[in-house]
Image (spheres, coloured by chain):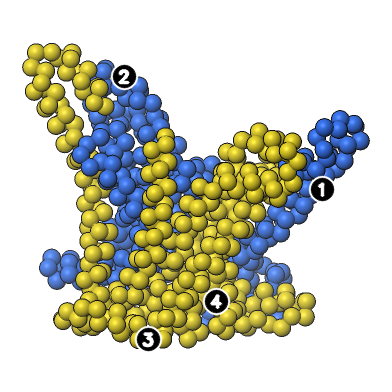
Amino acid sequence: MANAAVASPTATTISGRKYGSMNRDRKWALRWSYFFLILFAIFFLTPPIYMFITSLKTSAEISAESNPWWVYSPTLANYIELLTQNQYLIFFRNSAIVAVLTVLITMVISVIAAFALARMKFWGSATLATGVFLTYLIPETLLFIPLFKMFAWVNETFGIQLMNHWWTLIILYPHLTVPFCTWIMIGYFASIPKELDEAALIDGATWIQTLTKIFIPVALPGIIAATIFCFTVAWAQFLYPLAFTTSTTELVLPVGIVTTLIKGDVFNWGQIMTGALLGAAPPLIIYAFLMDYYIAGLTAGATKG
Amino acid sequence: MADIAARGSVAATGDSRSSLHKLMQRKSTIAFLMTLPLIVLILVLVAYPAGYAVYLAMLNKGMTRFVGFGNFDFLFGRETFWMVVYQSCLFAITAVIFKAIIGFVVAHFVHNIPSKGQRKWRGMLLVPWVIPPAMSTLAWLWLFDPSYSALNWILAGFDIERIPWTGETGWARFSVILVNVWIGAPFFMIMYLAALKSVPEQLYEAASIDGAAWWQRIWYVTLPMMRNIIAITALFSLIVTFANFDIVRILTRGDPLNSTQIFGTWAFRVGIESGDIPLGSAVSLFMVPILAVAATFILRDITKRGSEV
């Protein structure tokens, strides 16, 4: 829009008056930009704000006929009730352990593999890199049914029950995170000048030393971006826990809120919104503090590679 | 890397031929070992299940007998199946188009304002993407609540009748698309914003000297420059939207009368909840064609750019 304003007055006239009108046009373009940005911001932020409003209400106020967008008698009862309730804390703990361990496993696997794929060309390495990217495009909705059956088979042959345990998710989630993390780490590693690791090799460093002493420190922004991506995916995953865990002690947050706080047709909305808001807090906090890394991770998938 | 190995062997002299060979061999062995966890993970958790899904889809309900294409035959004869096909395509295509348009427009507005304010706006507008979809869909579910809908309360202020957001086929379809657009549009915005920043300013200057109007500058400069990123973002989003699960599952559970059911949610209903694993597997396999097409295009774009660099 601002560019449009530059275009409208003929660029050849150098009179002050023309410049004045150009400035005015630009000002209007700016005002319109802000106007529409505010509209979009309202659209984008309404649900989370409404979550917060509802979380401060009592059940009586929620079912009252009063203005739903205002809190007449704010209360923290929902928060206190949820945070003193064992069940919700178990969901939170399960989610946290699953997400953190998924991040650790993913980063170890993908950083090492990305290093090998980016720097140590070997037979089939290019194909493997493409294959890794393709894997990322296979959605979990395609895989959960065969995995369900495979778990039954594991139980029959090895006697290990994978169903209905939260730690099963730690085994499963890496397949959602490793391909993308490997892919963006290949991009970051490939952008490191070859002279750096050649110098290290000449100085007698082993491959492992080159990785830990040079690649990881230099590509640290990429590693942080990948870690954030990995955490948000593991935290938000909904289908696998819904399909593979059922008892209330084994659930993770998203599924826990949906299945235990919604009892039949009785919706305790104050608690559901509080639970959802607290569940959304960890990714939001990470995002608030590490926004640039977060965005780097988002755009890396398409702009790198 | 080969030249390093070569340099190493020159330094060693003497039995250069065999030591070079050994070194190469050792390096590729190490490299293979380093990628082994990745390969095992992909084989066990992605490749094998994907192949297994095809096999499962050809068994009878009790998984005791091989029935070939029996399950697919059965699906083709069911009206619900065709409704799911229709809804999946409608859902994915409409949602992606609106995400792309909203993302493009918002990215432009953010790009327009002075750069010191851009960070703040960008940060604010990306929030829907950061909240786990399951949580934000719950907020929408509550906004759409049949009796206490806060959206209907606002509409009542304008004398508009209460809308059955998730209760009626047409509105329910609209609602799931709306929520999907709400979650996905910020992602498009971020991608397009990054692309907008990379368009050289000189091109716009040249265009304005030639007297191009604002829409001409978007049509002839911005769009061609961003074509690649627009295509790849849209294709990528098409895959994710087509395979969506949580939004539909939480918002409507596929109701009313399976009219908002898409492949992912219907496969869950049939395969896990009704216990017909082969049929559920057959349903989910119908996602493969569209995924394959989108993946081919994405891959072509990536290898093309790879060879350019």
Query: What residue is shown at x 43% (from left), y 61% (from top)?
Result: B239
Residue highlighted by disc 2? A199
Query: What residue is shown at x 53% (from left), y 56% (from top)?
Result: B129
Colour for chain B in the figure: yellow
Question: What kind of residue is marked 1?
Answer: Trp
Residue highlighted by disc 3? B78
- Do dots 3 and 4 share one subunit? yes
Across and down, in percent, residue A102 comes to 34, 52
Query: Mark 2 to mark 4: distance in Å?
Result: 60 Å
Query: Mark 1 to mark 4: distance in Å?
Result: 38 Å
Residue highlighted by disc 4? B173
Residue B302 in sight here: yes
Residue highlighted by disc 1? A28
Chain bearing mark 2: A
Question: What kind of residue is marked 4?
Answer: Arg
Mark 2 or mark 4, whichever is nearer to me: 4
Q: Quadrant of residue B12?
A: top left
Colour for chain A in the figure: blue
Query: What residue is shown at x 42% (from left), y 36% (from top)?
Result: B308
Between A302 and B114, the residue placed more toward the observer is A302
Mark 3 or mark 1, whichever is nearer to me: 3
Query: Mark 3 to mark 1: distance in Å?
Result: 57 Å
